[in-house]
Each structure stands twice: as C-alpha cells, then as structure tokens.
Amino acid sequence: MFYSLDILGTIAFAISGVLVALSKRMDPFGILIIAFVTAVGGGTLRDVLIGDTPVSWMKNMTYTYVILGSTIFAVVVRNKIDYLRKSLLLFDTIGIGLYTVVGVEKGISAGLNPIICISLGTMSACFGGVIRDILCNEIPVIFRKEIYATACIIGGFSYFLFMKLTMPVDLAFALAGLTVIIIRLLAIRFGISLPSLYKNEESSF
C-alpha cells in the first residue's frame, strides 16, 4: 500500500511540476527537470535524513519511468486542462497528502519518535514544491501565509490519533492523507491563511 501511495504521490507532484513549467513557458528539457525535482525532491531529503541510501528513486527505476510518463501525459493533454491554476492546486494538494503519510511511515519504520515522524512527513511533502518554486523564480508556498505545511502537520498528528483509536494501520494512513487533502482544499476554497506577524505598512522610502 505504501509503495502505491509513493507512486501516486510521484505522479501528482510530477504533473504539478509540469503545470508550473508550462506556465513559465519552459522548453521540454526544463519541463522534465522541474517535473523530476518536484516529484523526488521531498523523498530524496527524507531518505538522506534517515540514512536510506541510495535514495529510493535511484534504486527503483519505476520512479523514473513514472515521472517520464506523467510528464509526457501532462504535456499532451495540456490544452484540455481548462483551469491551469486549479489543476495545479489539485495535483499539488494530492501530492502533499500522499507524501505526508509516506514520510510518516518511513519515520515509523526507522523507529523514530512520533514528532520526528511528523516532521519527516512534512518535509517529504513540502520540499519538492520548495525546489520547484525556487527554480521557477517563485516564493515557495510553504513560506507564504497559505495553509500548506500546517495541513501536513495536522495530517501527521491525525495518524497517531487514529492509531490511538485502534484503527487498522492502512485505514489510519488513508484517513491521515485525506485529512491533509481536505484541510488544504478547504483553506483554498475559503481563503483561510495563517495570520501575518507584520501589519501592512507603506514604506517610508
């Protein structure tokens, strides 16, 4: 199940990377690079931190094939995607939901403290998007007021809460991933964001 979630997360993030690259009018090579780093950036950080090297996408060529296939698919059907921004938000949201639970599971398998597992899941979910946005000259979503990493943290906590309720492991992980997705979508739908520490003040210069 977790391998399947990892593959699904890879597909979702690869497509989100393609959509951003297309919006920046990149050439085919640029599109592929953005798709690749978006898909495997978080997983690479996760595996390096827990000492699982070579990292997963280097040991299993399925990830490379999946990214290539997802990139080609997204490019081919780009003209049929009417609402590019909405599509990007959807695939990015699915990606962070899936990668959060995969990261938490990896941390549990490594025998880490639950808080560290949640941190690992959050980094797994967010870091690929951070690399994508930096390469595309955008301020990463995680550094804005949007509910993004917060959704991953809540989803990670929810898994351990579900386990306290003696739910089956697979169901707990599925619900935790769904929690991340629902929180993120609700935040987008209703414009919910974290409060800013700074007041909107005009510059004196």
Image (cartoon, rainbow, N blue to C red):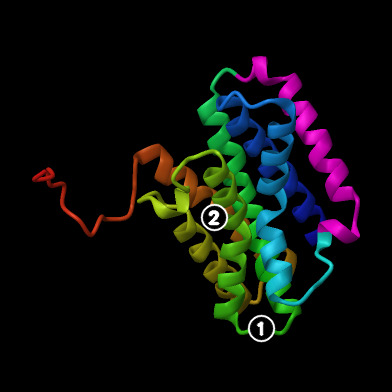
Residue type of the residue flagged with mark 1:
Leu
Q: Residue furthest front?
A: 205
Q: CA distance from mark 1 to mark 2?
A: 21 Å
The numbered mark, 1 or 2, whose residue comes first in the sequence reads 1
Q: Residues within 10 Å of mark 2 (few under 14, many from 20)?
A: many
Q: How many marks?
A: 2
Where does label 2 land, which residue? 180
Place of residue 101 in the rendered image (x, y in percent of width and height, measured from the top left): 66, 62
Q: Which mark is residue 71?
A: none
The answer to if 56 sits in the magenta stretch is: no
| 6 versus 164 height, above or below | above
Place of residue 184 in the rendered image (x, y in percent of width and height, measured from the top left): 48, 48
Residue type of the residue flagged with mark 2:
Val
The answer to if 58 sits in the magenta stretch is: yes
Q: Which corner quadrant of the image does residue 109 belong to?
A: bottom right
| 198 versus 160 height, above or below | above
- CB contact under 8 Å: marks 1 and 2: no
Where does label 1 land, which residue? 112
Q: Which residue corresponds to the image point at 78% horizontal and 61% vertical from the top-left?
A: 2
Camera sees residue 174 = no
Q: Which residue corresponds to the image point at 72% horizontal and 70% vertical from the top-left?
A: 48
Question: Is 177 left, or right, of 111 in this rendering?
Answer: left
Q: Which corner quadrant of the image does residue 27 belong to?
A: top right
Quarter of the picture containing the N terminus is bottom right
Q: Nearer the viewer, residue 36 or 169?
A: 36
Q: Which residue corresponds to the image point at 76% horizontal and 55% vertical from the top-left?
A: 6
| 87 versus 121 height, above or below | above
Q: Which residue corresponds to the image point at 80% horizontal and 64% vertical from the top-left?
A: 55
Secondary structure mostly taken by the magenta-highlighted segment of the chain: helix
Query: Magenta span covers which residues?
Result: 57-81
Q: Residue furthest top?
A: 79
